[in-house]
Every structure is written in C-alpha cells, then in structure tokens.
Amino acid sequence: MSANNGDSTGYLDMELLRFTTAGSVDDGKSTLIGRLLYDSKSIFEDQYEAIEESSRRKGDANVNLALLTDGLRAEREQGITIDVAYRYFATPKRKFIIADTPGHIQYTRNMVTGASTANLALILVDARNGVVEQTHRHTFIAALLGIPHVVFCINKMDLVDYDEKVYNKIKDQIESFSSKLDVKDIRFIPISALKGDNVVNESENTPWYKGGTLLYLLENIHIGSDHNHIDSRFPVQHVVRPHSDEYHDYRGYAGRIAGGIFKPGDTVAVLPSGFTSKIKSIEIFNEKLEEAFPPMSVTMQLEDDIDISRGDMIVRENNKPNVSQDIDVMLCWMNSKPLIPSGKYALKHTTSDARCMIKNIHYKMDINTLHRLEDDKNIGMNDIARVTLRTTKPLYYDRYSRNRITGSVILIDEATNETVAAGMII
C-alpha cells in the first residue's frame, strides 16, 4: 500500500478537478472518500495502519475508512463531519481536490464555501431512505452555485440487495425535482462505499448498470469548457513596479484571469477609466506566453502608460461587463447575527473593495419546495434570499450563471471583520 501519484513527468501540467461532496448525515460521504483514496492507492501505509488501529479500538468489524477524512476531533467523537475538510489526491490521469462538506441543515453555509469553486458535486443518497429534504437542499445549492456537473451516488446498495428498481425509483425522483433547476449535466451511479461497489472497481453485484465507476467518471469527465472563454475579464490584483536599474521602466499588471482568452496585440479597455491600449506582453515566471486563459495567474504589460490600480479590470474593447451600483443577488447568509434591513456592509467583488447597503429584500427561498416566501424578511444563518444591494461605487460584473468569478460578491461586517454572506449576482 503506497501513495501513488502517477508519473511525475508532466505532473504539474495535469488537469485539476475540484469536487465537493454533500448528502445527509450518515449517507456515507466520508466512507466514500476514504474508499476512493484507499482503492486508488492514494494513502500511505502508516495512514492505513492508524485508522485500522482506531477502528479496532472502537470495535468496528471493518476498517472504518471514514476516519481518513473525519479530521476534526469533534467529528471523530460524534462520527459526523462539521466543517469543510479539504483532501488532495492524484491518479496518473488527473489531480483532485475534494471538499468534504457537512450534511446537517445548520451547515448549509459550509457547503456554499466548499462548493463555490467546484467543477463537480457528488451528492450521496442513502438507497434505503431515498430522496430526503437534504437531497433537495443540496441539489438546489449545487444549481445556485452553478456547479457544471452533478453526480448522484445512490449509496448503500448492498443494504437493498442491489435492487435495480430501488435505484430507478430514486433516479426518477431526482430527475423530477432537478428539472425545475438549472443544472447542465446530471449523472447517477449505484454504489456501496463500504464494500467498494462501483467506486474504483466495477461491481459484479450490479450487472444491470453499464455506466462506469465513479473514479472513471472523475478522471474522464470533460471540464475544459467549464470556464467562460468568451468574455475576457482580467481583474488587476497588483501593479508590478520593480525598483531596479534592469527593469527601470517596467510596469506590469498581475492577477488571475477570470474569463476569456488574452493574446499579445489584443486591443483592450481598462475599467473604470475606459482608456484603451494594446497588450504588449503576457508573462508567467519570466516566460512570455502566446495566450492566456482562466484560471491562469499572469502579469500583463500594456503598450501605453495608463494609470491602473488594484480593483481595475482589463477587458476586451468590444465586450464589456455590466456596470451598476444597484446589484440583484441571491444571498446565502453565513453569520449568527441576522441580516439587518438597510444595514451597511463592506463588499468584496473580484479584486475590488466597496461598501454597500441592503436596499431591498425581495424574498426568502424555501429550499425544499422552491417556493418564494415574500412576506418573510427575517434572514438568519443558512438562509438564502434575493436582495438588492446599493454599492458606493459601480461594480463591473457578469451574471453568476455566465461567470462565477465576476458574478460573485462577499459581504463583511465592518465591526467584526467577519464574512457574513456570499452572493451570486442575478
């Protein structure tokens, strides 16, 4: 048993898939991740021995693979996941970052945190219980966060005798609910995380299922087009001015590309000034690039000396984002102190800082029924609501469904400096 990270040649160039896990408590998320890591030979000998010893002390009949991911001591004592636990592993085909998020209703905010950058969501459903309230909640959040691929793992198939009828019934229920939501790509896999059926190895117990294993799906699902390569967006994070004789006149703009494709020679506009120039060069670690695209972090030089600072945005001259001080957002409230109507908060959007006021609360969302509660204006922790924000300066944004980076904001309580909400611009 050894950690197999594949061939090191070209390792840095391997594609990275970020995925998040969700499901009700005891649906087997941690066991599934443990099974993935164990069967794909991505854990070390001493790690396995440690959980083997821990399982023996607890009197478990089998080695409890869930202990691989339940890293917090409080989780181990309660046997549940209460924070977002990030795990990293790799196979010869791809690198992976897993955000293992909690199942309890009171941890909705943790799922929003873990899922905000994910390419794919794994939602577990207990085959014995079928679709429950949390399944609806997690599917809704995955759709709200614009996660491009959602995979439903119908788990504990061994406890329903691998019955195809049970699997098909749950599949039909999920398809009926998700048809009301904007989810681009939905898949279903019957698994047993405990026994390893269809996780890394194909199961002989489900001859009726022809869809391939979970690991095969994770390694091969196409994520290249998950980023927006149409709308060119480059929020400036830092202005690079080396104080040296060698680079006396150097002025570069460093940041992470949020959308589109940039090439030297392209005519670009700088917001908010509106001045135009051409890209002189694009560099990464002193290496000049012919083109750059998301999610690359690069330094750009322009041909003209324009006054640009952190928070400005470089875009294509003929493809500019929306600009407004009144922003409609779906807000996920993350703080124990409730939202204050007409309250003032600090706001972060890409690399830009502003302040904002809650101008209007339109409705609170009932996640389980998808009904809009227009009379309920009390927004507390884990609630999701549609609100209008008035900002102190114009924001340059795209709809969240078009660009997850330029379409998201976070609100901060200025008194405590705590992040109180995450918002998706609609």
Image: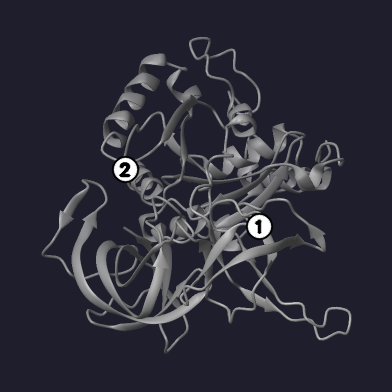
Image vertical order of residue 365 relative to residue 4, above or below: below
Q: Which secondary structure, mark 2?
A: helix
The colouring scheme, among rainbow, by chain, secondary structure or one colour, is one colour
Percent position of residue 153, x then y: 48, 32
Q: Which numbered tag is attached to residue 184?
A: none
Q: Nearer the viewer, residue 74 or 425?
A: 425
Q: Earlier in the sequence, mark 2 or mark 1?
A: 2
| Rendered position, 376 above or below 372 | below
Tell me if residue 155 comes above or below residue 68 in the rendering.
above
Closer-to-camera residue (349/117): 349
Q: Residue at x 71, y 77 (%)?
A: 251
180 left or right, relative to 335: left
- Seen as rendered, the residue at the extreme left is 375
**Spot occupied by residue 71 in the image (x, y as percentages of width and height):** 63, 57
Q: Residue 257: tell me if it is visible.
A: yes
Between 364 and 265, which is closer to the camera in this rendering? 265
Q: Quadrant of residue 262?
A: bottom right
Find the residue positioned furthest to the top. 207
How many numbered marks are there?
2
* Left or right of 235 in this view: 96: right
* Residue placed under numbered mark 1 in the picture: 265
Q: Which residue is mark 2?
A: 136
State the residue at coordinates (55%, 14%).
205
Q: CA distance from mark 2 to mark 1?
A: 48 Å
**Left or right, residue 47 beside residue 321:** right
Pick whichever, 138 or 39, lies toward us: 138
On the image, the x and y values in percent for residue 101 come to 50, 53
Amino acid at pointer 1 = Gly
Q: Is residue 64 visible?
A: no
419 relative to 259 in the view: left or right = left
Residue farthest bottom in this picture:
415
Marks 2 and 1: which is nearer the front? 1
